[in-house]
Amino acid sequence: MARFVGVTMGMVVLLALGEAFGGGFAVAALVYITVVAGVMDRLAVLAAPDHPGAEFPAGTRLAVALALVHFPLLYGGVAVLSSAGPLWERGVLFMALALFLGQVSNSNAHELIHRPARALRWLGAAVYASVLFGHHASAHVRVHHVWAATERDPNSARPGEGFWRFLARAWRGEFVEGYRAEARLRKGRGGHPYPAYLLGAAVSLCMAALIGGGAGVLWLLALAGYAQVQLYLSDYVQHYGLRRKRLMDGRPEPVGPRHAWNSPHGFSAALMLNAPRHSDHHTRPAVPFPGLDVDRSAMPVLPHSLPVMAVIALVPPLWRRVMDRRVRKWAAATRTN
């Protein structure tokens, strides 16, 4: 557990210092989440155990702390970015904060919406709503976890589908299917959460306007857009091309280890609260992040860390060159088992 605290809170401290004092601290935050993360991922000695065992902490305190610090970092960043500081400094801070929102805050909100306590789930939804993405709290649980690795899941990329085409399809599909899933679940009972998500987005935009006027709203939109793209990159990378078999009755087989791509790299996995251990998360979604396993013989493993693969995914021809043969390998293994 100390590894998760050290890696995530190291980024929080650097970002806070970057917002307060700028200059070298902002540069340090950006270097930390890019260069340092890449170097540390290559040091096998720092890798986490594939199987952490049955006894592990739940990580709730860290998840709550990261969620609570998300808000001052987000709106503090909007304040600094809306100021008249040096353009290069604001650019560096924007990149560092946007990467934090996309990799750490997104992953932490994802962890919270899977927790059984209602207060924790709504805290995760509030984090998503602050970056104008509250509906993901419904769509992820009600749609993605039900239909992952099938055609019915907007967030599971099809074989050969480039990221940019996937992005347009997935954003609209997730919003609509999440709404429909909640409506079916609550039919006749009321209490649909989408109005709360939209209200949260409106409050976030008002906060940005109060802090920085029109510029504050534009910076919030930019940060939110960047964070959302990173989340869709994660979904794209972690489910690209993998499909569940159809059973005799037409239903898909249960989600198993072969239906998501995994990254066992220690540093970036700690930064993202083990979200790259994606197969185990789908087979055991109630397990808190410190207890997720990786089985390299039974689960598809990415050739590079999740952040590196996300960058490759931005160039579809390069992505297909790296991944399509691996997809074919796992598709063949699925057919023979």
Image: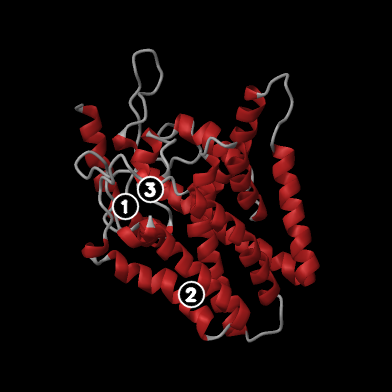
Q: Which residue is mark 1?
A: 263
- Between circles 2 and 1, the one closer to the viewer is 2
Mark 1 and mark 3 lie on one chain; the one further toward the N terminus is: 1
Mark 2 and mark 1 lie on one chain; the one further toward the N terminus is: 2
Residue 29 is labelled as: 2
The amino acid pointed to by label 2 is Ala
Residue 312 in the figure: left or right of residue 196: left
Q: Is residue 241 visible?
A: no
Q: Position of residue 51 (x, y in %)?
A: 26, 45
Q: Nearer the viewer, residue 97 or 1?
A: 1
The answer to whether the residue labelled 1 contacts the one labelled 3, judged by CB atoms less than 8 Å apart, is: no
Cα–Cα span, label 2 and label 3: 24 Å
The amino acid pointed to by label 1 is Ser
Mark 2 and mark 3 lie on one chain; the one further toward the N terminus is: 2
Dot 2 alpha-carbon crowd within 10 angstroms: few under 14, some 14 to 19, many 20 or more: many
Q: Nearer the viewer, residue 140 or 335?
A: 140
Element class at badge 3: helix
Identify whether 87 is placed above or below 219: below
Q: Position of residue 234 (x, y in %)?
A: 44, 51
Residue 290 is labelled as: 3
- Between circles 1 and 3, the one closer to the viewer is 3
